[in-house]
Amino acid sequence: MPNGTLGKQKTHLIAFMPSGKRGRFPHGTPVLEAARLLGVDIDSVCGGRGICGRCQVDMTVGRFSKHGVTSRENSLSPINEVEQKYDGRRKLKKGRRLSCQAQLLGDAVIDVPATSQVHKQVVVKQADDRKIEMDPAIRLHFVQVLEPDMHNPTGDFERLCAALKQQWDLDDLECDIRTLQSLQKNLRKGNWNVTVAVHRGTRITKIWPGFNSQAYGIAVDVGSTTIAMHLCDLSTGAVIASAGMMNPQIRYGEDLMSRVSYVMMNPGGELLLTEAVRGGINDLIAEVTKQAKVDPDDILNAVFVGNPIMHHLLLGIDPTELGGAPFALATNTGMIVWASEVGMISNPDCRAYFLPCIAGHVGADTAAVILSEAPYLQEQMTLIIDVGTNAEIVLGNNERLLAASSPTGPAFEGAQISCGQRAAAGAIERVRIDPVTLEPRFKVIGSDLWSNEEGFEEATNKIGVTGICGSGIIEVIAEMYLSGILSSDGVIDGTMAARSPRIVADGRTFSYVIREGENEIKIYQTDVRAIQLAKAALYAGAKLLMDKLGLEKVERIQLTGAFGSHIDTKYAMVLGMIPDCDLQEVQAVGNAAGIGARIALLNNSARDEIENLVKTVEKIETAVEPMFQQYFVDAMAIPHKTAPSTELAKVVTLPAPKVLSDRGAEGGRRRRRRERTAVAD
Amino acid sequence: MPNGTLGKQKTHLIAFMPSGKRGRFPHGTPVLEAARLLGVDIDSVCGGRGICGRCQVDMTVGRFSKHGVTSRENSLSPINEVEQKYDGRRKLKKGRRLSCQAQLLGDAVIDVPATSQVHKQVVVKQADDRKIEMDPAIRLHFVQVLEPDMHNPTGDFERLCAALKQQWDLDDLECDIRTLQSLQKNLRKGNWNVTVAVHRGTRITKIWPGFNSQAYGIAVDVGSTTIAMHLCDLSTGAVIASAGMMNPQIRYGEDLMSRVSYVMMNPGGELLLTEAVRGGINDLIAEVTKQAKVDPDDILNAVFVGNPIMHHLLLGIDPTELGGAPFALATNTGMIVWASEVGMISNPDCRAYFLPCIAGHVGADTAAVILSEAPYLQEQMTLIIDVGTNAEIVLGNNERLLAASSPTGPAFEGAQISCGQRAAAGAIERVRIDPVTLEPRFKVIGSDLWSNEEGFEEATNKIGVTGICGSGIIEVIAEMYLSGILSSDGVIDGTMAARSPRIVADGRTFSYVIREGENEIKIYQTDVRAIQLAKAALYAGAKLLMDKLGLEKVERIQLTGAFGSHIDTKYAMVLGMIPDCDLQEVQAVGNAAGIGARIALLNNSARDEIENLVKTVEKIETAVEPMFQQYFVDAMAIPHKTAPSTELAKVVTLPAPKVLSDRGAEGGRRRRRRERTAVAD
C-alpha cells in the first residue's frame, strides 16, 4: 500500500472532489478533520458529533492516476455505531458516510456532494439558472457547555462563549437580552448541550436546548400594490413556502402619491400606514409558516425590499419628505434592525435587513433588481425597467451604472382605464386584431382559449370577462395601431367606423369595442391617452439615461416588476414603451426585486456588495432634467415621433405613419401640471 | 513686540495654564483652535460658534518669564458681536472670553478654568474628597448639516454623518431606528442645525433641533431593601436630584431568599418581581425629573448596580439559578442595554449600563463598591464590608483582591428582632448602658436628645419610640456585653436581675428592658442569638478571606451599605462583627455602591477598568469552604472565642470573660440547617 510516514506515524493521501484539494494525514484522522485542515468546504452543525448529518461524503473506489491515489473500500474505517444510529434515525443514502465518523485508514478519494457544502450553489431563478453561493447571515452551531463550578464562578453566558470559541472558533460574541433571559433554562433543559444561532459571526440570536438544525428566513418584496414573501430554509436555500397579498395600505390610497397625501393631510396618518403594512407582513408570516409547518419563532433573518415610501413606512419613518422636492431620504444606507423594532411576529431577535434606497424615487427594490440582474457584471449595455406606478430605470454595464425613476402613473396596472382592472381571473390579458376585418380576439386570465375558439364562452362562463388588465391594454393599443385603427399620434380614427362596427363614435371622439353585450368592454380615446402618458414617461426616462451615457441604442432590455414580467416584449416595443432594440435581447425577467431580496437573504456578502455598489450608482432626477419634457412629448407618438424603429421593423410590419391631430402634445402639458403639483409642497 | 514670523506670516506665542502647553500660531488664530492643536482640553458643544459658552477662558496680563511670554490686554482681539450676544443671553463673567471667538493678536497667557475642561475633575464623595475625571459615555455635538440636493441625492442621515465627520471628526456613526424616525423633522425644525447625543463615540441616541447643551444620566443602586437614584448633569457631573424608596419587591418577600422562593413556587413570579422593581425605578425617575425640572426624555444614560438577584430581575432574567448551588450567574460581564429593554420611562434610546456581577452571591453592587473605594489602588491591606442581608466582603490591595459573600440574614436590618424595625423616625438608633446602675439611655431617629435629657418625651411625643433599628441593636447588645449583662457566649445573665429591674425573666431565659410602659421595648435572648448568628457569619467570611491571603490582621476596614454606613465602628468591633483593627482605620464610608454607580456614569473608562478588574478578583464561595463552619462557631462569642482584641482593648475597657452556657454553638447548628435548605434545590 502506498502509505507514507510522517515522523514515525503512518500517513495516507486523501483527495477531495470536486475541489481537487489533497493532502497527507495520519492513520485514523477523521475525514471531516482532514477536510477542515485542507480548507475543503464541508458543512456541520453538530461539530463532528454525528448528529446533524450535514457532513456526508461519498468514497470513490478506484485508481486516480491524476491525483496519484488508489482509493479502496477499506480506505475508510467501517461504518460505526454513531453512523448506524444516524442511519436508523434519518437514513443515510447508500454508500454515504458521515465524514466526522469515517476515519482515514488508507489512501482515499472523497466526493463531497453539493448538499454537504456550506457554500453550496443554489438556483434562485429558474429562468436563467442564476445560481448564488449559500452564505446566510445566520449560522447554527451545536455546542457542549461546561457546567457551572462554585469554585470558579463564571456566568453561564461566558461559559457558552468559551465553548463556542473552543469548539467553533467564534470570538467576542454578544447576545440579545432576550436570549440571555432564556439562556439558563435552555442550557439545563439541553443538559448543557445547546444549539445557538449566530448572526454574522458576532451575535447570538437564539438558543435551542439540545440539537437543532433548522433556521428560517424570509425575503419580502413590499410593493405599493402587492406584498410578496418567500420563506426560505437557511441551510438549503430552498423556498419552502410563498405567499402574496394586496398591500393593505391600499385603503389609504391606490398609488404612492395618494398615500403620501393621506399622511400630509391626516396627522398621525403615517402611523396607520405603518401599522397597515406591518400587519400585512405579519399575515404573510402567519401564512407561510402555516404552509410550511414552521414555528415563527424559528424565523431568524428577514430581508425587505421596497420603494422608498414603502421602505420608510415599514421602518416607521414619516414619508412626507419623499412627497415633494427635494425628495430627501431619511437614509440611503442598508439597515439591520430587530424584527421587534418593526413589529414582526417572527422571533423578536430576528434581524431584519433593509437593502439601501438609492434616491428619493429609486428604492431598495431597485437595489434588489440590480443585485438580481447584476448589470454591473455584464459588458452588454443593459436597460432594466421595473414597471409599476413609478417605473424605476437602470442603465449601464460593468463600467457605469445609472438609475432614475419616472412617474408612469397607474395606467399600466389598469387604473385610470375605463374598463381597466387588476390582473385577476376574468381580465383580458391578450388581444389580437385582424388587420383586414378589424375583429378582435382575446384571452382572459383563467382560460387558455382564445375568444374565437370553440368552448370559450362555456369556459369563461363562471369567471366572466370582467375587464382588461395591464398587459391586455398594452396589446390592444399596440394592435389598434398595427391595424390602422390608431394613428401614430394616438387618435382613434373615426373614418374606420365605416369599415367596422367595432369603431364607434363616443361624443367628439371614437372608441373601439373589444367585447359587446351586457358587460361591454371598449377602449376609449381617453384610455389611449392615459397609456400614451405612461409609456412616454417611461421612454423619456430611459432616453435621458441613454443621453447621459451618449448612447443611441441599448444592447439588452430587461422588464421586471409584477406587471413588467407579464408584458409581451414585442408589443411593448410596438407601443414605444422602450427604446428600439434587438427583440431577442428584450426579456421579461420576472420579479427581480423579489429575487434580489432572496439573494441578500441567502448570501450575506451580497449585502455588502450591493451597498458598495449603490454608492457608485449615478442618480438622475428626471424632474429636474431640462430635456425630460421634450423627450416626453416626442415619446407620446406611437412608437415614437422621431426615433427610428429599425430593430422593431425586422419583426413587425409597421403601418405607414398617420397623424390625425396634435393632441398628444396636450397630454404633455397636462402631465407637466401634475408634476408641478407633486413638487409644490 | 516679541512677535516671530512663520514664513511670511506674523505669529504669536500662546501659553495655556494650568497645563503649561505652549506654541506659536499665526496672527488671528482663534484661541480655541490653538488649544485644539496643542491638545489643551477645552470643552465645546457648539463647535466654535459662540453659542454654548463652554469654551470660556481668562487672559492673564503680565510678564511670565518662565514661559517667555509677555501677555498684554490687546494680545486678544476685542470682544466681538457674538460674545456680546452670548453675554446678553447668559452673562460672561468679567474678564472671561469665549475662546472660539477671541483671536490671537499678540503673545498671550491663557488660563483655562476647570469648568471649561471636558475632562474636569469632579468630587463624587464629600467624605474623602474623592475626585474623578469627567468622561461620560454621552457627548453632545452641535452640527450644521447640508440641505438635500436633488442633483446629488443622499439620505438626511448620511449628510448628518458627513457633517459630524467634518465638524467633529466622528466616524462610522450608527443610529437607533427611533432616532432615524425623528431625524427628518428635527433637521427641518432646526433649520439644518441640530445637536446630537453620541454614545461612546459610536452611536447617535438623540437629536434635538437647533442647539442643546443639556443631557442627563441616572446612577441607580438597586438594593433588596431600598433603591436609591441620583440624577446627574452629564456635562458638570453634578447631582441635581436624588430620591430613594423601599424596593417594591418587598411585598413578595422581605429578603432575597424569600423572593427567590416566591419565584420558585409561583410560575411567572419572576415577571412580577421584574415588574415591581422596574416600576419602582420609574417612580424614582418621575420623582428626580420632577425635582430637577428635567424632561425624562433627556435622560440618555443610566448605570445600575445591585446584587446578583436584583441585577438579574431588573434585566428580566429568572433568578432561580441563584437560589441554589452552584449559584450560576446568567452572565458575569458588564452589559449595555436599551432603556426600553428594561422598561424605563427615560428616553427609550437611553443606554443602560449594568456593572458586572462578580459571582453568584457577589454582585454588581460589590463591583461598584470596589470602583468607589478602589482598594486595588492602595498598598494598605483593606477589608471592605457591605453590610446587608447578605454581606459582601472584599479584601485586598493593589496586588490581589478577593471577594466573598456571607449570609448574615436580615437581623442587622431589624428583621427577626422582636422589637426590631427599619431605620425610620421613632426607631432607637443609639444606646448607652450605665455599667453600675445598668440603666439605659437612648436616642431615636428624629430627635437629637438622649432619653435621659430634659424635653425628650415632649420631643418624641409625636413620632413615638416605636422600636429599635439595626445600629441601635448593635449598640444595645455591645453595651449589654460591656456592662456585664451579657456573657461572652451571648447569654443574658439572670443573676443580674437582682441588681436591676431591667433584667427580667422571660420563661427559661431573660430579657433586658430598654423602655418600659405601654410600648415596651426589650431585648430578648432570641434577639441576641439572631445578632450573634449574623455577626458570626460576617466575621467568618472576613476571616476566610484573610486566611487565603495568610493574614492575621487587616490594616484598614471600611463599612458600607445603607446600614453599614450608620454603624458606630467601635460597637461593631466590640460585638465582633469585624476583625480587630486599629479603630482609627475603621470607617463607615457611606453608600459606596451608589458612589461607584455615579463614577461609572460620569467616567466611561471606569467601566472598562472595573470590568477588567473583576475578572482578576478571586472569588471565594463561603458555602463550600471547609473552614467556614469552624470560623462561624468561633465567631459566635462576643467579641470572639479565640481571636485577641488587642486594638479594641486600647480604646474600650472589655469585661472579664464570662461564659454561661454553650448555647452559642446551638445557634451554629441552626444556621447549618438553614444553609442546607437553601442549597438543596
Image (spheres, coloured by chain):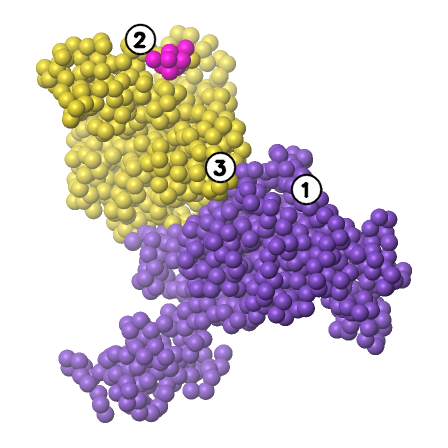
Chain colours: A yellow, B purple
- The label nearer to you, 2 versus 3, is 3
Secondary element at image label 2: loop
Return the x and y of residue B420 as percentages of the image width and height. 76, 56
Q: Is residue B262 visible?
A: yes
Q: CA distance from mark 2 to mark 3?
A: 43 Å
- Viewer-proximal residue, B209 or B394? B394
Quadrant in which the N terminus of chain A is drawn: top left
Q: Is residue B463 above or below residue A278?
A: below
Q: CA distance from mark 3 to mark 1?
A: 28 Å
Q: Which residue is located at x 45 percent, y 60 percent?
A: B397
Residue A640, image x and y in percent?
24, 36
Residue that mark 1 sits on: B669
- The image quadrant of residue B140 is bottom left
In this figure, which residue is indicated by the disc labeled 3? A148
The magenta span reads: A80-88
**Pointer 3: residues within 10 angstroms few (<14), some, or many (20+)?**
some
Q: Secondary structure at mark 1?
A: helix
Q: Which subunit holds the residue at mark 3? A: A
Q: Please, what is the three-letter code of the amino acid marked with disc 3? A: Pro
Q: Give amino acid for label 2.
A: Lys
Q: Position of residue A658 (x, y in %)?
A: 25, 33
**Same chain shared by disc 3 and disc 1:** no
The answer to which quarter of the image holds residue A563 is top left
Say if A170 sits above or below B417 in the image.
Answer: above
